[in-house]
């Protein structure tokens, strides 16, 4: 049976987000506030008062201009792919705590263990990162990543893997901020600081606790929205740690590509997979488009999937479904 004592994100016209101050309570937050990242991309250069939900909403309303190759690589996932089924074997999601030298406090992540998990077998690991207003519960509670993986594993379409879903906001107080604080420099800075928390603290702690295949060929990094931006920045900068990358509707905060990939030949040799996606109704598509074009210009193989979604769970769930089937092959 599934053992997931997790707070739930419920998709609705206005997304329901758990109030971290009161476990089990809910408050309504407009969807644009949850995943609006264009404003966050320039926080380091701007004053806090220059960042607002109104500006984020305006960024989402920008016209989408598609190029000839901004097309689907995959169809939508089949009906029910993200819905738990009583007759399918279930993995389990458990809380994991680790000490962080970056924040100076003990932090929490959620860990998905596949059906039939045993400490007598070693597993590859996928690190799965959330959006700017989410936390370690977003992938399971909102996107239903555990149900997606359960279905794929039951059908033999994915390699059994451990999936680590951390809180990507590396701050002493890492709770999702209220809407009026989402786009502050302090909140955005926590996502940048997570690079060292991930590499120096979380990964070693996971490898010490679980039976992992602790090498780059068996370690993947992926994320949605802000987590997609983190994936691009951290993954490409640390191909000695990650061989598999997935960025879904990534934030337009990628570092200069020449800085991330100073040696295209080395990147081609080391990357097992770079999976990039976005919806064709997402006003922030210009960020992922620019990454796709930079990869293409440098001859770095990658998948570019442009589906018919916006900046929402539809595209994130679908692309996790496709991405997970390609990992660790």
Image: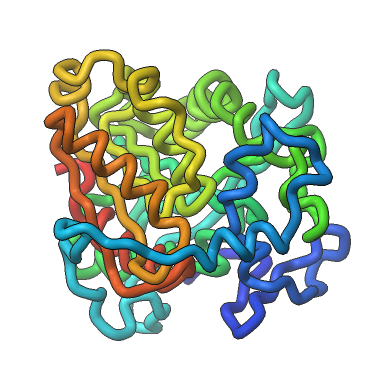
Q: Position of residue 21 (x, y in %)?
A: 87, 59
Report which quarter residue 233 is drawn in: top left
Which residue is located at x 43 percent, y 70 percent?
A: 310
Report which quarter residue 121 is drawn in: top left
| Viewport quadrant of the C terminus | top left
Instruction: Name the side, left or right, on which 180 lies relative to 62.
Output: right
Which residue is located at x 67 percent, y 30 percent?
A: 45
Image height check: is 26 above or below 6? below
Instruction: Name the side, left or right, on which 189 lies relative to 104.
Output: left
Which residue is located at x 78 percent, y 60 percent?
A: 179
Report which quarter residue 235 is drawn in: top left
Q: How many marks?
A: 0
Colour style of the rendered protein structure: rainbow
Q: Position of residue 77 (x, y in %)?
A: 25, 74
Q: Position of residue 300 (x, y in %)?
A: 16, 32
Instruction: Name the side, left or right, on which 164 lies relative to 56.
Output: left
Q: Position of residue 264 (x, y in %)?
A: 20, 20
Image height check: is 279 above or below 39? below
Task: Tell me if I can see residue 163 in this picture.
Answer: no
Instruction: Name the side, left or right, on which 328 lies relative to 113.
Output: left
Task: Tell me if I can see residue 130 in this picture.
Answer: yes
Frontmost residue, 63 versus 299: 63
Frontmost residue, 323 versus 301: 301
Image height check: is 199 above or below 232? above
Which residue is located at x 73 percent, y 41 percent?
A: 187
């Amino acid at each position: 049976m599934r053992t997931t004592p997790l707070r739930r994100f419920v998709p609705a016209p206005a997304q329901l987000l758990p109030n971290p101050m009161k476990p089990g309570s809910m408050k309504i937050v407009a969807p644009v506030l949850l995943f609006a990242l264009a404003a966050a991309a320039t926080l380091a250069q701007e004053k806090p008062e220059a960042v607002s939900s109104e500006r984020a909403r305006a960024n989402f309303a920008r016209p989408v201009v598609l190029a000839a190759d901004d097309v689907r690589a995959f169809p939508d996932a089949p009906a029910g792919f993200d819905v738990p089924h009583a007759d399918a074997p279930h993995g389990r999601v458990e809380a994991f705590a680790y000490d962080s030298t970056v924040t100076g406090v003990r932090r929490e992540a959620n860990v998905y263990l596949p059906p039939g998990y045993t400490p007598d077998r070693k597993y590859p690991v996928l690190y799965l990162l959330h959006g700017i207003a989410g936390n370690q519960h977003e992938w399971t509670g909102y996107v239903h990543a555990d149900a997606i993986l359960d279905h794929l594993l039951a059908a033999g379409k994915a390699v059994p893997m451990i999936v680590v879903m951390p809180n990507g906001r590396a701050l002493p107080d890492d709770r999702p901020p209220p809407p009026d604080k989402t786009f502050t420099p302090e909140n955005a800075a926590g996502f940048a600081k997570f690079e060292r928390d991930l590499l120096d603290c979380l990964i070693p702690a996971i490898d010490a606790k679980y039976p992992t295949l602790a090498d780059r060929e068996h370690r993947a990094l992926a994320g949605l929205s802000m987590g997609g931006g983190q994936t691009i920045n951290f993954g490409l900068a640390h191909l000695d740690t990650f061989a598999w990358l997935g960025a879904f509707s990534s934030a337009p905060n990628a570092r200069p590509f020449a800085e991330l990939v100073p040696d295209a030949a080395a990147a081609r040799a080391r990357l097992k997979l770079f999976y990039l996606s976005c919806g064709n109704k997402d006003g922030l598509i210009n960020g992922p488009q620019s990454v796709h074009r930079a990869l293409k210009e440098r001859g770095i193989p990658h998948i570019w999937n442009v589906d018919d979604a916006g900046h929402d769970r539809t595209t994130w769930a679908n692309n996790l479904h496709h991405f997970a089937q390609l990992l660790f092959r």
